[in-house]
């Protein structure tokens, strides 16, 4: 880490590009996280309070509960994939923000 | 000399070689604590996966699903989805703004001494509980495998682990995790394959069997696909469903507060690699936990309960190895047992590493010596000594508690503490400008105390099942909001911190752009 002059953090933080980056990040992360938490916590809620519905068989002996549990794995992987894709764009914006400051 | 012992010694020999190699490369704090930040994305993904897939995961979950079916599978789901929290909220800001430990991030704009002291305490508590669980598991396995007593087994494990950590540091423990993760995946895939082979590779037959699981013909058929065998109202009373929700909340938020997982993100060159390592870890861990369906549920269709019972008690931690023996003979039993044992050893090393790093870096260097390293290498030497002491203490506790203490209970405790004490403070520090030292101190201490007290008062705690004042075995649904609340109240009811708020701009820029992040050292 070689810096000839100290970094003016406030100046960078005030840049419209930086603020835009933060707004973009929030716009994805907050809804995504909230959605995941609701989808995930629906699992113990449904399994605990609507067990008869969850025990209904969907394919052979495989029931709704098991399918819903498996879907959580899909949720996690899909969300990871989406995040990596959008974060790559954020990396470019971040690099543009600090251009000239390192 | 029996086969498990030989395989185990082979693995140990290999890892000692790695430790020797790593010891030569360990020049300086960045090398010892952060493996020189030279670990790549997929390597760290494997190491994180390895750190995570501990005795509780492989042995414990197999056992839980064997006994309780679907409700046991809830652990598998929660353990994976937890990485969403890590990926979206914590991994990158942590890597960008910190140096070696979680407390580095917290102390960024807060007064370092109180925050680091408490963060160090919290890290030590979480790591110790996690570690005792592993040591107990290790002692039990070794006792079964090579027929020595519990105490020498635990001591032997502890000593080996100490060699890895004291001499090899983060580099050695990382590579031990990577190798162990690969072996564990191979073992899990083989075990799953053999289970499906037993069921003639028919998915329909498999699930039919599970729905009429009769434990190898030794019991009346039970439908293990149905939820409710552990947390259902019929079994656990009206608090059962809430206990399950509480468990799930603790799991999904706890990983993002586990110091020994978080510290892995400092071993990669930058935040982008931290991100990709989480994704790699999620792929590996996800695959592994889906396979627990096969060897967990599958075991219940194959293994008679009598095979697992010693002295009238069901040894549920041995489901996976016994399944290996039933399906693949003594050789496969040896392999799986050695892998399970290696798993524990590697996790214990990782935990000791993060606990001793925390003590040396956070408490010793920063709290006692105000951030000045008085002699070069002092911080590393303190870490090594701490590792030794922590190792000795956990050996002592494990021996004191004995082989019948529930390892899963201790791991659950670790997750709840992490989510109640650490996570609120991490999140608020990065995302809330007004957050100050008083808030951090309140959050860490109240979160820590609340989760521990609630567990002691739970049915698994000191009053036993009947007399427990707190009805839930998992305190998360109560203690996590308490942690957040304490951090919030501590902040708004104390004086504003203009210095801390002024530094928020710097923290924001660092966390979100990576400017000024600790770079990899070149060898």
Image (tube, coloured by chain):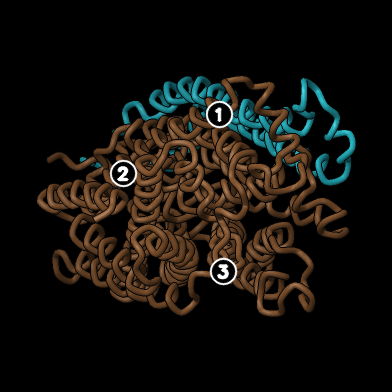
Dot 3 alpha-carbon crowd within 10 angstroms: few under 14, some 14 to 19, many 20 or more: few
Distance Cα–Cα, label 2 vs label 1: 42 Å
Point 66% across, 79% down: residue? B462
Give the color of chain B as drawn.
brown
Of mark 2 and mark 3, the one earlier in the sequence is 2
Distance Cα–Cα, label 3 vs label 1: 29 Å
Label 1 belongs to which residue? B198
Q: Which chain is cyan?
A: A
Query: Pointer 2 indicates a residue of which chain?
Result: B
Of mark 2 and mark 1, the one earlier in the sequence is 1
Respond whether the residues carrying marks 2 and 1 are from the same subunit: yes
Dot 1 alpha-carbon crowd within 10 angstroms: few under 14, some 14 to 19, many 20 or more: some
Query: Pointer 1 indicates a residue of which chain?
Result: B
Point 57% across, 65% down: residue? B406
Q: Quadrant of the N terminus of chain A?
A: top left
Whole-percent x, y for residue B394 in the image: 40, 72
Of mark 3 and mark 1, the one earlier in the sequence is 1
Label 2 belongs to which residue? B267
Dot 2 alpha-carbon crowd within 10 angstroms: few under 14, some 14 to 19, many 20 or more: many
Whole-percent x, y for residue B81 in the image: 60, 38
């Amino acid at each position: 880490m070689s810096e000839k002059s100290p970094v003016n953090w406030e100046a960078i933080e005030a840049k419209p590009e930086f603020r835009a980056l933060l707004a973009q990040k929030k716009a994805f992360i907050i809804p995504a996280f909230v959605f995941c938490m609701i989808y995930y916590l629906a699992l113990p809620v449904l399994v605990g309070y609507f067990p008869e519905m969850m025990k209904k068989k969907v394919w052979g002996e495989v029931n709704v509960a098991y399918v819903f549990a498996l879907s959580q794995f899909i949720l996690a992987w899909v969300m990871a994939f989406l995040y990596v894709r959008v974060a790559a764009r954020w990396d470019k914006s971040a690099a543009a923000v600090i251009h000239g400051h390192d | 000399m029996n086969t498990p012992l030989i395989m185990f010694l082979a693995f140990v020999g290999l890892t000692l070689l790695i430790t020797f190699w790593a010891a030569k490369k360990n020049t300086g704090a960045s090398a010892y604590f952060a493996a020189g930040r030279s670990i790549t994305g997929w390597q760290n993904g494997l190491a994180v996966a390895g750190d995570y897939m501990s005795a509780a995961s492989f042995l414990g979950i197999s056992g839980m699903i064997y006994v309780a079916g679907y409700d046991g599978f809830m652990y598998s789901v929660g353990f994976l989805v937890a990485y969403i929290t890590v990926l979206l909220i914590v991994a990158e800001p942590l890597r960008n703004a910190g140096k070696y430990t979680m407390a580095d991030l917290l102390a960024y704009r807060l007064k370092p001494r109180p925050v680091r002291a408490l963060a160090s305490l919290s890290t030590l508590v979480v790591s110790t509980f996690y570690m005792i669980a592993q040591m107990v598991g290790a002692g039990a396995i070794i006792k079964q495998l090579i027929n020595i007593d519990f105490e020498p087994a635990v001591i032997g494990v502890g000593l080996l682990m100490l060699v890895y950590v004291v001499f090899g540091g983060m580099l050695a423990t990382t590579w031990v995790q990577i190798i162990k993760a690969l072996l564990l995946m191979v073992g899990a895939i083989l075990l799953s394959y053999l289970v499906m082979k037993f069921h003639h590779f028919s998915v329909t037959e498999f699930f039919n069997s599970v729905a009429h699981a009769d434990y190898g013909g030794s019991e009346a058929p039970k439908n293990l696909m149905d939820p409710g065998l552990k947390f259902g109202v019929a079994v656990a009373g009206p608090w059962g469903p809430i206990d399950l929700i509480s468990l799930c909340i603790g799991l999904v938020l706890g990983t993002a507060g586990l110091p020994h997982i978080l510290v892995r993100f400092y071993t990669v060159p930058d935040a982008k690699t931290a991100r990709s390592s989480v994704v790699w870890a999620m792929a590996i861990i996800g695959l592994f936990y889906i396979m627990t369906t096969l060897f967990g549920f599958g075991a219940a269709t194959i293994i008679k309960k009598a095979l697992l019972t010693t002295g009238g008690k069901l040894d549920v931690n041995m489901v996976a190895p016994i399944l290996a023996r039933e399906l693949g003979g003594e050789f496969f039993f040896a392999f799986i047992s050695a892998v399970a044992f290696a798993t524990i050893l590697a996790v214990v090393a990782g935990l000791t590493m993060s606990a001793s790093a925390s003590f040396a870096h956070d408490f010793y260097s920063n709290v006692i010596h105000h951030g000045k390293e008085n002699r070069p290498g002092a911080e590393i030497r303190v870490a090594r000594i701490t590792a030794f002491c922590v190792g000795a203490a956990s050996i002592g506790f494990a021996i004191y508690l004995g082989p019948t203490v529930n390892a899963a209970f201790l791991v659950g405790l670790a997750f709840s503490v992490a989510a109640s004490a650490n996570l609120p403070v991490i999140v608020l520090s990065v995302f809330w400008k007004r957050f100050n030292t008083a808030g951090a101190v309140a959050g860490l201490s109240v979160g820590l105390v609340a989760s521990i007290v609630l567990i002691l008062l739970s049915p698994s705690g000191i009053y036993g099942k009947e007399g427990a004042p707190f009805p839930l075995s998992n305190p998360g649904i109560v203690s996590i909001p308490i942690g957040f609340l304490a951090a919030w109240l501590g902040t708004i009811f104390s004086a504003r911190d203009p210095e801390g708020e002024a530094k928020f701009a710097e923290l924001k820029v660092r966390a979100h752009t990576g400017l000024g992040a600790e770079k990899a050292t070149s060898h």
